[in-house]
Image (cartoon, rainbow, N blue to C red):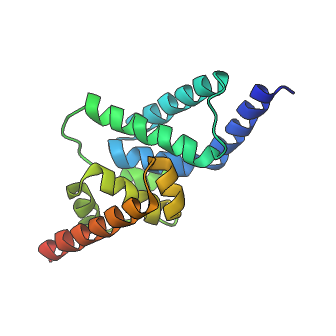
Amino acid sequence: MDKKRKLIVDFQNYLQENRNAHYRLAYSYSKHPEDAWDIIQTSIEKAIRAIQKSNFPESMNSWFYRILINSSLDYLRKNKRLIITDSSVLECMLEHEDQYENIDLEKAMEQIPTEIKTIITLRYFEDMKISDIALVLGQNENTIKTKLYRGLRLLRLELEEEI
């Protein structure tokens, strides 16, 4: 089996194993099930093109998350519109114990900047290490820590206002 074919098979296995995590991340941006699947499909297409061009780094996880986040941000730029979230749709589509049902937290997450929301989502909902988040976002670990703590402080303020 040649190198590219092996990479594609490894990539297919990776996608199969992590499909729920990828969906949750895409859904956290789009707030719509079909759009989340479109984001994932676009990300997979970009990844396969990169594999065919031999642009494949060592860490598949951080590499694909970077593609997925960029595709999600592209989606947001192209589809600037009011997004209404129905959390029951997400609950039905995902059978995952880490679903957050706290409406106040969900509203507070929507109030913070997208980049900080991404860091918080990757750290606490996807359980990624700071070093992996830094690799995914192409930033220094200390920068990620600073933004994470700033985001947590913003969330605390938003939640206190709700109370």
In the image, 61 versus 131, the foreground residue is 131
On the rendered structure, is 160 left or right of 2?
A: left
**What residue is rendered at 53% in x and 52% in y?**
21
Quarter in which the C terminus is drawn: bottom left
**What residue is rendered at 41% in x and 64% in y?**
142
**What residue is rendered at 63% in x and 39% in y?**
57
Q: Position of residue 124 (x, y in %)?
A: 44, 66
When asked about the image quadrant of residue 13, the answer is top right
When asked about the image quadrant of residue 35, the answer is top left
How many numbered markers are drawn? 0
In the image, 8 versus 81, the foreground residue is 8
Q: Would residue 96 be visible to someone looking at this image?
A: no
95 w.r.t. 160: above or below: above
127 w.r.t. 34: above or below: below
Quarter in which the N terminus is drawn: top right
**What residue is rendered at 46% in x and 47% in y?**
138
Q: Position of residue 84 (x, y in %)?
A: 23, 45
When asked about the image quadrant of residue 87, the answer is bottom left
On the rendered structure, is 43 left or right of 4?
A: left
In the image, 63 versus 17, the foreground residue is 63
Q: Would residue 161 be visible to someone looking at this image?
A: yes
Q: Position of residue 126 (x, y in %)?
A: 50, 59
